Amino acid sequence: MALWLVRAGRHGEYEKRFIDDKKIYLTWGGGFSKDLSQFDTREKLTNHLDSIYPNYKPGKLRNASGQIWAFVHRIKPNDWVVLPSKHKAAIHVGKVLSPMVFNTKLPPEYSHSYQVDWFATDIPRTNFDQDILYSLGAFMTVCQIKRNDAEKRIHAMHNNNWHVSRQSIAQTNNDENDDIDSILNDLEQIARDQIAKLIIAKYKGHGMARLVNAILEAQGYTTHVSPEGPDKGVDILAAPGPMGFGEPRICVQVKSSDTPLDTPTLNQLIGTMQNVQAQHGLFVSWGGFKSSVDKEKAVQFFRVRLWDRDNLIEELLENYEKLDDSIRAELPLKRIWTVAQTDSDE
């Protein structure tokens, strides 16, 4: 068995289709209308891709050929696939159930596929060790993950309720043929993962409400923070103006658990909003939300906002310079600039 990284489009535009259909698709460049499994050598596949993408530089052509060859010929039934979400701070894991199928009746982006059992979805990124996240940040659409005994360690996490099993960690890499040794990582995602680990170390439990409160104050709200202990569904009350008498009035619930939350907790917040006469609600869940809550986003759009880990970090970074000095001392961050990867990069 092998462990594969797959992506559902540059911006995660196919992610829902992957999960709902219980499949992975070769969506590369909008897909292919010709069965690529008929090319039985890398050279033949590369020549075919060269005819489709004549503007590809040699390095980019080799890179594309390697990834597409892996999808078409190397993924096997019983292999595991890892799909990092582009829409939330979470990772999906599945098991390949079938050989690759080519279906001419589907649009090109869905013509090449494998049946997958997505047996674990919405696993918080913070559950994974940083070196595993480095591998999952590779600038690749398809690649095998082998560094640092990743396959064994992710299997061990599965057996440990998706928490790190310390007995399984191996920090050495003796595979000279590692597919991703020289692959650039998504530096922005790596930085966010590091910030996330610092936040959860500093603000676990009620401390998370203190951090959210500091962000709201930086945004100009006057707030009331419930004391630590049973909060009856209210962690923070916030409203504009120097005394907090302005509108909108916001009721905030903050959860620092790494477990994705379901609709009953969202419904509890909506009920609490009525009790405290708040017009709007903000639900902050470090562990993100289950798909049932995601489906409520449109229904509750004019009443409730949902912040997962990435949303919280985004608001933190946007308001960092206006945060209280004590918060910035606890979270020392530095802005850096780097060259962005483009389609023309080899």
Image (spheres, rainbow, N blue to C red):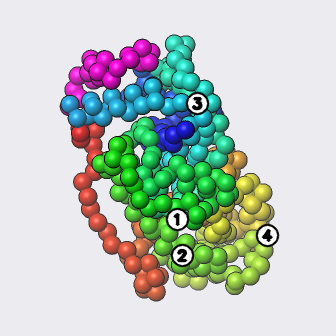
* Residue 66 appearing in the image: yes
Q: Which residue is mark 2?
A: 201
Of badges 2 and 3, the one in the foreground is 3
Which residues lie in the magenta part? 35-57
How many residues crowd around disc 1 within 10 Å: few (fewer than 14), some, or many (20 or more)? some
Residue 312: give its label.
1
| Residue on which the image places disc 4 | 275
The reply to whether discs 1 and 3 touch (Cβ–Cβ < 8 Å) is: no
Q: Amino acid at mark 2?
A: Ala
Please give the residue where the numbered disc 3 appears in the rendered image: 77
Q: Is residue 54 magenta?
A: yes
- Residue visible at 54% across and 75% down in the picture: 201
Q: Is residue 265 above or below residue 104?
A: below
Image position of 314 (left or right of 22)? left
Q: Position of residue 61 (x, y in %)?
A: 26, 30
Upstream in sequence: badge 1 or badge 3: 3
**What's the distance in space between the residues labelled 4 and 2, CA to CA?**
33 Å
> Label 2: how many residues lie within 10 Å, few (<14), some (14-19) or many (20+)?
few
Give the CA distance from mark 1 to mark 3: 38 Å
**Three-letter amino acid code of the residue under disc 3:** Pro
Separation of marks 1 and 4 at Cα, in angstroms = 26 Å
Task: Tell me where residue 7 appears, x and y as whole percent.
Answer: 47, 40
From the viewer's side, name the closer residue of 45 and 236: 45
Disc 4: CA contacts within 10 A as few (<14), some (14-19) or many (>=20)? few
Task: Sort mark 3 into few (<14), some (14-19) or many (20+) by Cα contacts within 10 Å.
Answer: some
- Residue 107 at x, y percent in the picture: 50, 19
Which residue appears at 78% of the width and 74% of the height?
A: 232
Query: Which three-letter amino acid code belongs to the residue tagged 1?
Result: Leu
First in sequence: mark 4 vs mark 2: 2
| Distance (Cα) linking label 3 and label 4 | 53 Å
Question: What secondary structure is marked by label 3?
Answer: loop
